[in-house]
Image (cartoon, coloured by chain):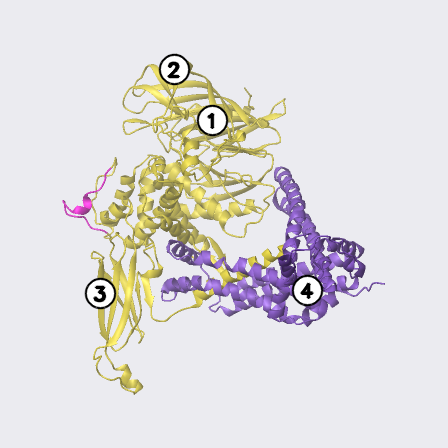
Chain colours: A yellow, B purple
Amino acid sequence: MPRFNVFSSAILAILTAAPLAATAQSIATNSPVPLSTRVTSYDIDARIDTDKKSLDATEVLTYKNLTGQALTSMPFHLYLNGFRPESTFTSETHFTGGIRDNEKADEYPKEKLGGITITKIAADGYGDLTGAMHFTAPDDGNMADHTVTEIALPHPLAPGATITFRLAFHDQFPVSIARNGYKRDFIMGGQWYPKPGVFWHGAWNCHQYHSTTEFFSDFGTFTVHLTVPQRYVVGASGVPTGDRANADGTKTLGFYGEDIGDFAWAVSPHFTVTDGTYNGSLGPVQVHVLALASHPKAGPRYREIIEKTLAEFDRRYGPYPYKIITVIDPEPDSQIGGMEYPTLFTGGTSWWEPTFGTELTAEHEFGHQYWYGMVATNEFEDAWLDEGINSYTEVNVLSSILGRDTSAFGRPYANAGDYELQRIEYAIKPDFDPVTHWAYKFRNSQTYAGVTYGKTATLLATLESIIGRDTMDEAMRTYFMKFRFTHPTAEDFLRTIEQVAVARGRATILPAGDAALAVPVGYADVPPVNSSLRRYFNQAVYGTQVLDYTVDSVSSSPVQWWAPLPDDKNAKKQIPYLSTVYLHRKGDFVLPVTVEIVFSDGTRLRDNWDGVERWTKLTYVRNAKVVSAEIDPDHAILLDVDLFNNSYTTKANTVPAGKLSTIWASAQQLFAQLLTWIV
Amino acid sequence: MTQQRNLLIGGLRLTLQSWPALIWTYALNIGLAIFFTFPLRAQIAAITVHSLASQRLTGAFDLGTLGGVISKLSDGPGPAVGATYFSIPIYFVLYFLLVPGVLVSYQTGSSAQLFPLVQSGFAYFWRFVRLTLVTLAIAGPILAGLKILQNLWSAHLDKNILGRPGFLLGLAGLVVVLLAAALLRVYFDLMQVYTVQLGLKAEGGKAGRQIRRAFKPAWKALFGNFFRTYLTFLLLAVVGFAAVFITARMAMHSMAQPRVWPMFLLAQIGLFVSLLTRFWQRGAETILVLDNPIAIEAVVAPEPVVAVAEPEAAQEASSDGAEEFSI
């Protein structure tokens, strides 16, 4: 084992000596008190073989039984075993696709083989438990999966008692797949160590690794030492606690994190460091960027967007309590970009990146620090509470920083707003799965992504238009501040919104027995609110109803249609017209809507329609014809899958069709010309 | 003694003298594209013409709104997008018929109107089919081999050199492949010109239909005048592609304007210049061939006497312009 210098050792001694004085200032957070219920404590020493792309480590894991009941077994995640052809992860990516990998070939590539082997496990007071390990497959019964192992304890662990495991394990990293592995001489340790499941709602929750799921774990502290060749630069979760050179040409670096649920690291000899500081409401936060030397502009870009994002999150949702956020710029063409871990995330850029893709990825992954990292919902079962909420906050934060209609791409000749990209992602496959489906039970990876990310972002944006932006912001802040470090559920989130909306007068309490209250209710700490928002939640969150309103037709005829039209121009203006507008609810999602009618004299009228019936007719008698009719004139109901049929204008506009067909025809001409170079 | 006329100027002169050929080819290029895009345009118009949402594609070019249009098009039952692709093979076939006529016109100064062009196209049709097959048979393996080497080069770069230097070195590898492709193209272009010259000199004789007789003169003409021929070809190719790139970029920057014609005009300028430079290349190659004409004895060399009389039907077919499949 590597030895540490006196300074590092002293720091670690102070840190680990403590059921510490609760008021002692942490070196890892800006909070004077522990932020979470610390169930686990890890002390890991790992030696990384950068040539063999492998790792050997020892792990001391202390687990505190806060479940209130005696535990007779403990399950552990062994995620790296997912990178084998027999695993559930690989099977799912092969047959239904994956958002990180899409292994369709009939032969599994050797370089994609990965795995983790626990060579020894013992527990203080329990002896050697290596023989007591056996693989389980709680989700699909695939006993060849090997991503979950269970240890039967020789005697129960009493409530309130602590067990200390001592493990030795070996990792073999695959070529980059699904957030893990190596690319060239870059290695990412994402889910690299044995990690126990979470005892949640009266049972162990330890799902297998799936193609579309992410992670769920208890909070705790991490003391990690990584040994790598000296030419390597290392980024890891937590704060660095010191490093020392070893005689064998390696160096050992120490990291410490607290109130985090996971620990990840990345090493590369090509990292360049860009540092910045954001002075948050709890204290300074170091923005520590490790960007590849081949991406010379990436460091400043990451730093700038993260500093701005920190400010937005601090203002909108609550403080970022950790002292550091580390940004890893992964190797190009790896499947490691755009992934979140506590106090560390991977971005995604290239040497030439003219869009806001770099900023968008960085903002999104930073946002996970709040929803995945601190609120820490169960991503296997409620993926939308992380990915979806994060996509919603991403839209709002990027709108503030880069502009609503330019947050994805902003050039004088073309633009794209992030909110539109989210909406389109959802609208492609809107009705297969509700957002509340467990992540690995979606129809396929496309519906998972479209619904979990796109639909959640869009339904929350639509909800924002229903209850108002201020109310929504307050609800989001309330939810974050109340539920951070607690693993809340879907109902906790929805009821918090209801509570705030009712308090602000933006929703009402429904009478008992109202049909809208018949909703699937899961576990929640927040008592039922039973507000008028339930109708929306039932359809948008728990349902698969599709929202599609259309203006079917617009017409204006003289009331006295039989009378001849006068020749005089002024007299014509005095002719009363009967104007009719037909509205149609094409989808099965019922939502009250506003309609704006514009008349030829410039008058604008607004009407409301509850949308309960399939269609409605609006009639007007005025001395002017209808020029246009538009449902949702404020463009707030983004959940409508077809925005084109929301309006009808009598003034034909051929420019868009002309532009698009010109582009297409010109491209056809060019391809035709290129083909003739054969002749 | 052969002449050494300026290929650029001479080629341009021929191109301009036979300007109807260029105009007809361009008209077919744009006409087919517009014709086959029309159903797609109608489908887009059905979505956008009376919708206020499409205003974001009028005074701006909102990619999200564009995505909405594409999404709606893919939902629709119409095969409009697929139908547009038909313009490409049809243009290819017509171009195939036009090229021999263009070369005849360049060499003889004959009319470059559509009918004579197509008539020549039919007369040389099978010769050009064989030429194209020979081109593919020879150029295909060479370029495939180079592509494999380029892939190895890219893989090497991918492992060792990243970022901008890696991109530029990878681009250099691609340029090498393109230079080789250009060399092959100019050689087979010359074969086409000589094939037409053979046909013209042989006046319908069998020798005039044997494209193998063009191999050697094309080789001699190219490598006897290598730099000026190759550089002229490359210069015109670069000008053509640069015109497309520059005008496409300018057209892209006019996408947000509330009118269509600037974008249309810019795109068409680039596409026309691209076609012009290709015709110019053929003009330059024709000048080279005219300055290095095929030896008359190669064309009228005595044929081996065939003892057995040809069947009557075959003779009739031959006199009707049908060709033998000999290289």
Upstream in sequence: badge 3 or badge 1: 1
Residue of label 3: A617
Q: How far apart, in angstroms, are the residues tagged by discs 4 and 2?
A: 85 Å
Asked whether disc 4 touches disc 2, contact meaning CB atoms under 8 Å apart, the reply is no
Q: Quadrant of residue A138?
A: top left
> Going by the picture, which residue comes out furthest to the right?
B1
Residue of label 1: A223
Please name which of the two marks, 4 or 1, marks the residue nearer to the observer.
4
Q: Chain of mark 3?
A: A
Please name which of the two marks, 3 or 1, marks the residue nearer to the observer.
3
Residue A510 inside the magenta-drawn segment: yes
- Viewed as shown, does residue A620 lie left or right of A424? left
Residue of label 4: B103
| Percent position of residue A197, x then y | 36, 27
Upstream in sequence: badge 1 or badge 2: 2
Q: Chain of mark 2?
A: A
Please name which of the two marks, 1 or 2, marks the residue nearer to the observer.
2
Residue of label 2: A132
Question: Residue at 76% across / 59% down in the picture?
Answer: B299
Residue type marked 1: Thr
